[in-house]
Amino acid sequence: MSATVNQLFEEALLLPTAHRANLAEKLVESIETDIDPRVERAHLHEIQRRRDDVSSGVVKLLPGEEVMAHARARVQ
């Protein structure tokens, strides 16, 4: 990364959490216009497939706390 990017990053870290999240969202939105339409279609198809799997009961959703506890246990 260039010095300017590193400097911007360091300055962004000083922002309150909500402002950092807002900045991150805006940065991601600025990149999303460069997405290949084929990739976007595939992404939307995957989202719909997963939504349908949840709706039909093919997959079971787990509480976030349970997932994170399981992940932490595996890492340690």
Image (cartoon, grey):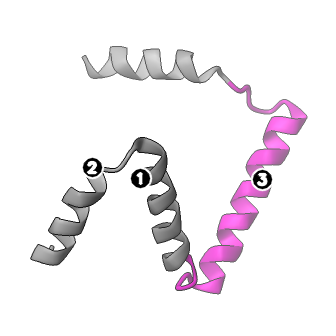
When the figure is inspected, residue 26 is found, relative to residue 31, above or below; the finding is: above
Query: Looking at the picture, which amino acid does disc 1 mark?
Result: Arg
Identify the image quadrant of the C terminus.
top left
When the figure is inspected, residue 33 is found, relative to residue 13, above or below; the finding is: below
Indicate which label's residue lies in the foreground, 1 or 3: 1
Q: How far apart are the two marked residues, 3 and 2, measured between alpha carbons?
A: 40 Å
Foreground: 15 or 70?
15
Q: Which mark is residue 38?
A: none
Q: Which residue is mark 2?
A: 14
Q: Is residue 33 magenta?
A: yes
SS of the residue under disc 3: helix
**What range is drawn magenta here?**
32-61
Identify the image quadrant of the N terminus.
bottom left
Total number of numbered discs in the rendering: 3
Which of the marked residues, 2 or 1, is nearer the chain's N terminus? 2
SS majority, magenta: helix
Q: Residue 61: where, in percent of width, then height?
A: 71, 27
| Crowd around label 2: few <14 · some 14–19 · many ≥20 (10 Å) | few
Q: Residue 12: where, in percent of width, then height?
A: 30, 57
| Crowd around label 3: few <14 · some 14–19 · many ≥20 (10 Å) | few
Indicate which label's residue lies in the foreground, 2 or 1: 2
25 displayed left or right of 63: left
Q: Residue at x 75, y 64 (%)?
A: 45
